Image (spheres, grey):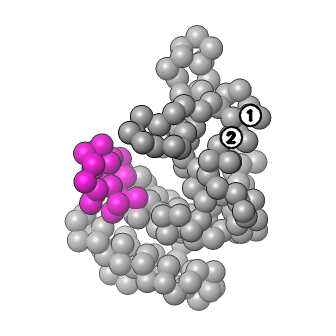
């Protein structure tokens, strides 16, 4: 089971075409009372923060989780079509290869941030990457298969390899990454 500080929702290219994250947040908050928006506490920020109330919220106002809406190509995310997702409990889930690369990207960004609160996320990012690495092995994810399918641009695949090498330089586990075909 994964414990999370926030939830990331990556919008598929069909769903997100022409929409930005702020618009999607307003739609979600307007459709379901479990979701609500708050102003960002960052000075000068114009964006809103989306939260989801967790079960039991009616008796405990603090039971909520932050929800990030990510619209590719923000943060170097790949465009994902709805046909490339799988469904778990009727929730569309991005391919695990993409999620693994996204988590390593998040680890790298947080590790190198000037913000202390972002750097503090490195431990959680690392745990997420290790858990996803294990899951990717169980699901027979392969860097080579992803490359051969042509689903991702050569730039994305190259970036994935670079990020994984950075991760390996810090945390090791070369054999696990090579088992997935990553060029480490």
Which stretch did the figure color magenta?
Answer: 106-126
Circles 2, 1 touching at the beta carbon (< 8 Å): yes
Considering depth in this image, is 166 or 13 the residue closer to the camera? 13
Q: Position of residue 140 (x, y in %)?
A: 55, 71
Tell how many labels: 2
Image-based side of 126 in relation to 81, left or right: left
Q: Predominant secondary structure in magenta?
A: helix
Count neighbours of disc 2 (C-alpha within 10 A) and say few if under 14, some if 14 to 19, many if 20 or more. Answer: some
Q: Say above or below: 40 vs 123.
A: above
Task: Identify the residue at horizontal 29%, vertical 72% (top origin).
Answer: 166
Task: Identify the residue at horizontal 30%, vertical 67% (top origin).
Answer: 167
Image-based side of 25 in relation to 132, left or right: right
Residue denoted by label 1 = 30
Task: Identify the residue at horizontal 76%, vertical 48% (top origin).
Answer: 90
Q: Quadrant of residue 48?
A: top right
Query: Can you say which quadrant of the picture contains the C terminus?
Result: bottom left
Q: Secondary structure at mark 2?
A: helix
Residue 118 located within the stretch drawn in magenta: yes
Q: Position of residue 2 (x, y in %)?
A: 48, 43
Image-based side of 109 in relation to 49, left or right: left
Q: Position of residue 175 (x, y in %)?
A: 33, 74
Looking at this rendering, what residue extends furthest in the front direction? 44
Q: Is residue 126 visible?
A: no
Residue denoted by label 2 = 26
Q: Is residue 53 visible?
A: yes
């Amino acid at each position: 089971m994964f414990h999370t500080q926030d939830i990331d929702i990556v919008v598929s290219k069909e769903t997100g075409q022409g929409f930005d994250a702020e618009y999607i947040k307003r739609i979600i908050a307007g459709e379901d009372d479990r979701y609500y928006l708050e102003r960002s506490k960052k000075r000068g920020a114009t964006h809103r923060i989306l939260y989801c109330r967790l079960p039991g919220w009616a008796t405990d106002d603090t039971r909520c989780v932050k929800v990030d809406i990510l619209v590719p190509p923000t943060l170097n995310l790949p465009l994902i079509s709805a046909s490339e997702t799988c469904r778990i409990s009727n929730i569309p889930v991005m391919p695990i290869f993409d999620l693994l690369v996204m988590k390593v990207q998040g680890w790298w960004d947080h590790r190198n941030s000037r913000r202390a609160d972002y750097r503090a996320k490195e431990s959680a990012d690392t745990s997420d990457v290790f858990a996803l690495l294990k899951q990717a092995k169980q699901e027979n994810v392969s860097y080579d298969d992803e490359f051969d399918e042509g689903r991702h641009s050569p730039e994305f695949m190259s970036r994935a390899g670079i990020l994984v090498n950075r991760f390996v330089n810090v945390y090791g586990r070369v054999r696990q990454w090579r088992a997935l075909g990553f060029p480490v």
